Image (spheres, coloured by chain):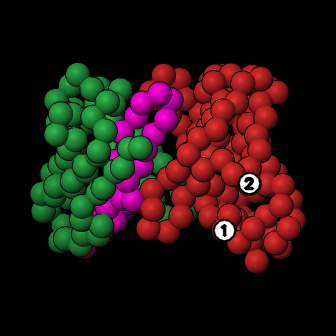
Chain colours: A red, B green
Amino acid sequence: NAGVTQTPKFQVLKTGQSMTLQCAQDMNHEYMSWYRQDPGMGLRLIHYSVGAGITDQGEVPNGYNVSRSTTEDFPLRLLSAAPSQTSVYFCASSYGSSYTFGSGTRLTVV
Amino acid sequence: KQEVTQIPAALSVPEGENLVLNCSFTDSAIYNLQWFRQDPGKGLTSLLLIQSSQREQTSGRLNASLDKSSGRSTLYIAASQPGDSATYLCAPYNFNKFYFGSGTKLNVKP
């Protein structure tokens, strides 16, 4: 099925650990983005990419790194996890204003 | 910085009622505005997209209006059903970025 696939769905990390959240899309969309959603708040943009090899910061980029080596994949890296990064993370890809969101990764940092 | 407010934060109604969900935003320089639906543990599904030049958009029992100059949008749900129970998110869009409100959590009782 065409869409955006995020892995893992759930993850528990210890403070200071690193990990990569995976995001893949099979719709050949140029634009991809990462959002985080915290309780009582809307989604906030972390990083985005307008095409392979091009990335830029969003509203809350600190503590996260991204790269875009292919059109299909846009991984999000946490270099040294902190409790403040406990959240639900959504990846999205888009063509124009038509967005497709993944089902999310629920991350807990203890 | 775009600030988005959604009122009410939560709403519980009996089946069959007509509903109005409100959204206000501070920066009227938007490209479009989208309303999304989010089910628990799931990603976001786009319901309606209103271009900045449009006043309203309709899809089935849903109607969304946009008053860009006053920074307001409303989502009207006619003849609500239990299957409409979800969180509804308003998101103005500009420069490849969404700015999300914190949502209205709707519960439609049978």
Which mark is first along the chain, 1 or 2?
A: 2
Task: Quarter of the image for the N terminus of chain A: give it.
Answer: top right
The rendered magenta stretch, by its main secondary structure, is classed as strand
Have a look at marks 2 and 1 and say if they share a chain.
yes
Task: Quarter of the image for the C terminus of chain A: give it.
Answer: bottom right
Chain letter for mark 2, please: A
Element on which disc 1 rests: helix
Mark 1 surroundings: few (<14), some (14-19) or many (≥20) residues within 10 A? few
Mark 2 surroundings: few (<14), some (14-19) or many (≥20) residues within 10 A? some
Element on which disc 2 rests: loop
The numbered mark at residue A84 is 1
Evaluate if marks 2 and 1 touch, with contact meaning CB atoms under 8 Å apart.
Answer: yes
Q: Amino acid at mark 2?
A: Gly
The answer to which quarter of the image holds residue A94 is top right
Q: Is residue A38 left or right of residue B26?
A: right
Above-or-below relation of A15 to A68: below
Q: Position of residue A77 (x, y in %)?
A: 79, 49
Q: Position of residue A4 (x, y in %)?
A: 64, 39
In the rendered image, which residue does mark 2 sit on?
A: A63
**Rendered residue at 40%/34% (across/down):** B93
**The stretch drawn in magenta includes residue B90:** yes
The answer to which quarter of the image holds residue A36 is bottom right
Q: Which residues are magenta?
A: B86-110
Q: Is residue A53 left or right of residue B66?
A: right
Chain letter for mark 1, please: A
Q: Amino acid at mark 1?
A: Ser
Q: Position of residue A80 (x, y in %)?
A: 83, 61
The numbered mark at residue B28 is none
Q: Position of residue B20 (x, y in %)?
A: 16, 55
Q: Nearer the viewer, residue A73 or B30?
A: B30
Q: Is residue A34 visible?
A: no
**Rendered residue at 24%/61% (across/down):** B7
